[in-house]
Amino acid sequence: MWPYTVNISKQPKEEAAKEHNSLIKLRQADYYIAIYTDASVIKRGRGVGVGYCSYYSSLCPIALGYSKHSQNTTNLGQDQLVYNGELEGVTMAAEYASRVAYPGLHIDIFSDNQAGLWRLKTLSDNPGQSHQIRVRKAAKTAKHKGATIALNWVPGHIDVLGNELADLLAKSATANTPESDITSIAMLGLKIKALDNKEWRSLYLRHTRKSPTTYSKTYSCKAQSKI
């Protein structure tokens, strides 16, 4: 049994954003924390930036009835993909949630990356497994304390205040000193593919110089995954 739920709306982005904002307003009187996560890469950055911000239910009319409770950022370095950053953001949020959990509290973690949420929902030994293990461990801790955690998709850049702040945090984190020197498996795959394409093109150009009129018509300059 999963110690957390994963919810991905099938509504169009605009409708999903309205539905989300309505939910946040309804949660104002509950024992509730909303945590928004995001990841980013920019050309002049020093790596994948990750950020999250949390809001706790309050009567204070700030941020749709929520007051900012916590925020955090990290930089994963240049040997990671944004996808890894999205997973790390949700994982960091879950680990934060496990630390602040108490009986009766419900914690919603929001991410605008559906692929990452599906990965955390699906048992597999594919890349992302370490994040899934960490999220499960954190959610079990929160559940043991009497709290519940749900992972939810929220549309990005469509009038969702928490998501906009998480995006800003992630972008600012790209300028930070990387806190990791780990190379992700997905990044290794991209590097291997790039070397494969480079080697294939070198061989192709060598043979087309020998017989340009026949070889180039028979074989395309594209690396194949199968013989």
Image: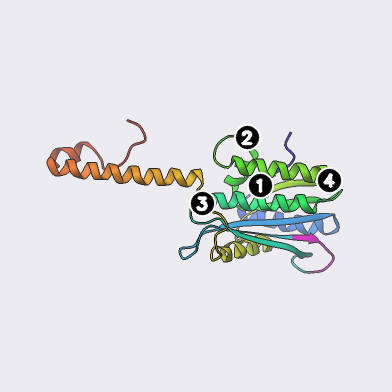
Q: Mark 4 or mark 1: which is in front?
A: 4
Would you call the spot at circle 2 few (<14 residues within 10 Å), some (14-19), or many (20 or more)? few
What is the CA distance from the residue labelled 4 to the residue labelled 2? 25 Å
Residue drawn at x 23%, y 41% is 203
Left or right: residue 191 compared with residue 14: left
Mark number displayed over residue 9: 1
Q: Mark 1 or mark 3: which is in front?
A: 3
Q: Mark 2: which amino acid?
A: Leu
- Answer whether residue 59 is magenta in the image: yes
What is the CA distance from the residue labelled 2 to the residue labelled 3? 22 Å
Q: Earlier in the sequence, mark 1 or mark 2?
A: 1
Whether pointer 1 and pointer 3 mark residues with C-beta atoms closer than 8 Å, the reply is no
Q: Earlier in the sequence, mark 2 or mark 3?
A: 3
Q: In this figure, which residue is indicated by the disc labeled 4?
A: 145
Q: Mark 4: which amino acid?
A: Lys
Mark number displayed over residue 53: none
Would you call the spot at circle 3 few (<14 residues within 10 Å), some (14-19), or many (20 or more)? many
Provide the residue span drawn in magenta: 55-61
What is the CA distance from the residue labelled 4 to the residue labelled 1? 28 Å
Q: Mark 1: which amino acid?
A: Ser
Q: Is 23 or 204 nearer to us in this picture?
A: 204
**Residue 106's x, y, as percent?**
80, 50
Q: In this figure, which residue is indicated by the disc labeled 2?
A: 123
- Answer whether residue 38 is magenta in the image: no
What is the CA distance from the residue labelled 4 to the residue labelled 3? 33 Å
Q: Circle 4 — which element? A: loop
State the image quarter where residue 173 is shown: bottom right
Residue drawn at x 32%, y 30% is 227
